[in-house]
Image (cartoon, grey):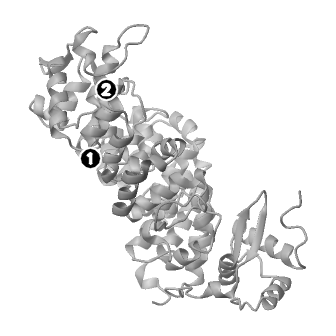
């Protein structure tokens, strides 16, 4: 088989090499070779002098086709028509620091940079587009983190590239242009950009979506799909008479089917009683009382606790206030202190993952941190995404100050502390450092935990870190096992400082 790049005219191999290197290392890493400029002149294409601009123009003019290797087909100068001009003039410092943030492994500073740009109502610089495209190729979920920060040039460029799922879909996926493996990310983006037409098309044509695409789509993006999509979940889940009622029931209750919610509540409530300020379970034996659940009986016998857990997960958390008086905090206290906590607590956890309510999630985590012995069916981090970061920081700060000896790697408070949804406030940063100073032995494990380093350095209070680095130096602040990381922490602090200075409104180049 002939290699797609074999037999190309002189200079094309160097063009391909230059484009690949620019994608990998940045658009200004290597000046444009003279042979590449010669190709442009032969094609009567006028390229910008700036390497970054020239790279973007070549991306628009060449269509990468995945045919076992890259093949570049020039589509013509007419493709440059309609190319939007840069929105503003970026300073070299601004472009440099934003480009650098995108090259750091796992992009720990991406959210902070995106937040600063959003605060200023700015888009990312056009020079960052190649790196952003590469990132969302590798991690599709980052598309929503970048959000409305894509430069207008991206939408124009998006239509010039034929080998990627569209960043900004305008209609249903075309099987001739969008590979089946790209349907999940395509549908996810389309639903967020145009919920009404996307939902209408899915409701009318969901049978056209391949089953493997559907399953992958829900698995990857289920938690982030719009609420308006829930009727479609009902359409694609079995009917109650199929013997598989749970997916249908969970979907129906999430749509707010009040009659069905009340029916489930009426059946579940008699199984729970309040006894001496503690909740207890009274589960009937397997048999007719459970047939309504549609849950099959396994060979080892009917599992009542499992059935109860599944039923609770179909109900919104305010069902507890309907059954028993008290605030979410009081009711969580009764649940965690129950003799049946090993069943109730996992059930409430699943309930909150299906019906995330910030107040209930915060109350659950507050009691969870105090009762780490109860086993959960998932991580505490799942619930942190639904809680405002300031409230979460206050909760973790108070717990560490009250029980610093529980700040152990792998513990519930450790999981919450390292959550990507938590930005450490200055009091929380102080509490963590104090805990390590009081118990240096804990620092040994933290010092080799990359997730802890990222949380401390990239999501810690920048003001607190700056003051400590100037006043005491990090080597004096942390216990000996951790102080060896001081140079690396200081490097991150300086990077974040440069990012904030570059993106303050009084430091704009123009526009």
**Above or below 53: residue 174:** above
Question: Disc 2 or 1, which lies upstream in sequence?
Answer: 2
Residue at left offset 53%, top offset 51%: 454
**Which x, y percent locates residue 409?**
49, 34
| Above or below, comparing residue 60 to residue 384 in the picture | below
Q: Please identify the quarter of the rendering in which residue 352 is found.
A: top left
Question: Looking at the image, do the residues carrying marks 2 and 1 touch, with CB atoms under 8 Å apart?
Answer: no
Q: Position of residue 481 (x, y in %)?
A: 59, 41
Residue receiving disc 2: 241
Mark linked to residue 62: none
Work out whether residue 334 or residue 305 is closer to the camera in this orientation and state it.
305
**Res 358 label:** 1
Q: What's the residue at 68%, 89% (across, down)?
A: 48
What element does badge 1 sit on? helix
Apparent side of residue 284 relative to residue 424 in the rendered image (left or right): left
Q: Quadrant of the C terminus?
A: bottom left
As drawn, 397 above or below 105? above
Residue 74: quadrant of the picture: bottom right
Seen from the viewer's position, the closer of residues 170 and 401 is 170
Residue 200 figure quarter: bottom left
Q: Position of residue 12 (x, y in %)?
A: 84, 76
Neighbourhood count class around disc 1 (C-alpha, 10 Å): few under 14, some 14–19, many 20 upward: some
Using the image, determine if residue 340 lies above or below residue 406: above
Residue 226 horizontal/vertical position (percent) = 35, 53
Residue 344 visible: yes
Instruction: Name the residue at 77% across, 81% down.
Output: 31
Side of 305 where 415 appears, left or right: right
Q: Tag 2's secondary structure?
A: helix
């Amino acid at each position: 088989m002939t290699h797609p790049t074999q037999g190309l005219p002189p200079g094309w191999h160097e063009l391909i090499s230059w484009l690949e290197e620019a994608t990998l290392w940045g658009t200004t890493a290597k000046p444009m070779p003279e042979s590449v400029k010669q190709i442009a002149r032969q094609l009567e294409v006028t390229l910008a002098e700036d390497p970054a601009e020239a790279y973007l123009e070549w991306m628009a003019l060449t269509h990468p086709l995945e045919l076992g290797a890259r093949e570049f087909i020039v589509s013509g100068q007419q493709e440059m028509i309609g190319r939007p001009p840069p929105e503003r003039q970026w300073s070299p410092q601004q472009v440099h620091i934003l480009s650098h943030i995108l090259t750091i492994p796992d992009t720990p500073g991406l959210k902070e940079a995106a937040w600063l740009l959003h605060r200023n109502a700015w888009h990312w610089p056009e020079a960052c587009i190649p790196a952003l495209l590469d990132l969302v190729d590798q991690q599709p979920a980052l598309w929503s983190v970048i959000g409305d920060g894509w430069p207008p040039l991206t939408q124009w460029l998006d239509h010039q590239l034929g080998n990627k799922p569209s960043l900004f879909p305008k209609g249903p996926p075309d099987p001739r242009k969008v590979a089946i493996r790209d349907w999940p990310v395509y549908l996810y983006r389309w639903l967020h950009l145009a919920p009404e037409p996307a939902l209408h098309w899915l409701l009318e044509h969901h049978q056209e979506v391949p089953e493997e695409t559907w399953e992958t789509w829900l698995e990857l993006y289920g938690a982030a799909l719009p609420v308006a999509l829930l009727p479609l979940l009902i359409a694609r889940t079995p009917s109650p008479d199929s013997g598989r009622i749970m997916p249908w029931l969970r979907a129906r209750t999430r749509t707010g089917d009040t009659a069905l919610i009340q029916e489930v509540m009426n059946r579940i409530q008699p199984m729970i009683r309040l006894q001496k300020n503690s909740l207890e379970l009274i589960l009937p034996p397997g048999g007719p009382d459970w047939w309504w659940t549609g849950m099959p009986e396994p060979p080892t016998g009917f599992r009542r606790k499992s059935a109860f857990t599944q039923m609770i997960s179909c109900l919104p958390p305010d069902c507890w206030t309907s059954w028993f008086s008290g605030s979410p905090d009081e009711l969580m206290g009764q649940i965690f202190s129950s003799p049946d906590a090993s069943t109730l607590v996992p059930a409430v956890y699943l309930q909150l993952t299906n019906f995330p309510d910030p107040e209930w999630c915060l109350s659950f985590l507050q009691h969870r941190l105090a009762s780490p012995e109860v086993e959960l069916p998932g991580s505490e981090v799942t619930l942190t995404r639904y809680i405002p970061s300031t409230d979460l920081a206050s909760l973790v700060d108070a717990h560490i100050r009250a029980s610093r000896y529980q700040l152990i790697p792998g513990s519930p408070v450790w999981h919450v502390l390292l959550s990507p949804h938590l930005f450490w406030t200055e009091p929380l940063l102080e509490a963590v450092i104090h805990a390590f100073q009081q118990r240096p032995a804990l620092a040994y494990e933290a010092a080799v935990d990359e997730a802890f380093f990222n949380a401390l350095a990239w999501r810690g209070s920048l003001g607190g870190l700056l003051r400590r680095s100037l006043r005491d130096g990090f080597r004096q602040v942390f216990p000996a096992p951790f102080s060896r990381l001081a140079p690396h922490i200081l490097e991150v602090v300086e990077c974040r400082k440069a990012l904030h200075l570059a993106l303050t409104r009084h430091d704009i180049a123009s526009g």
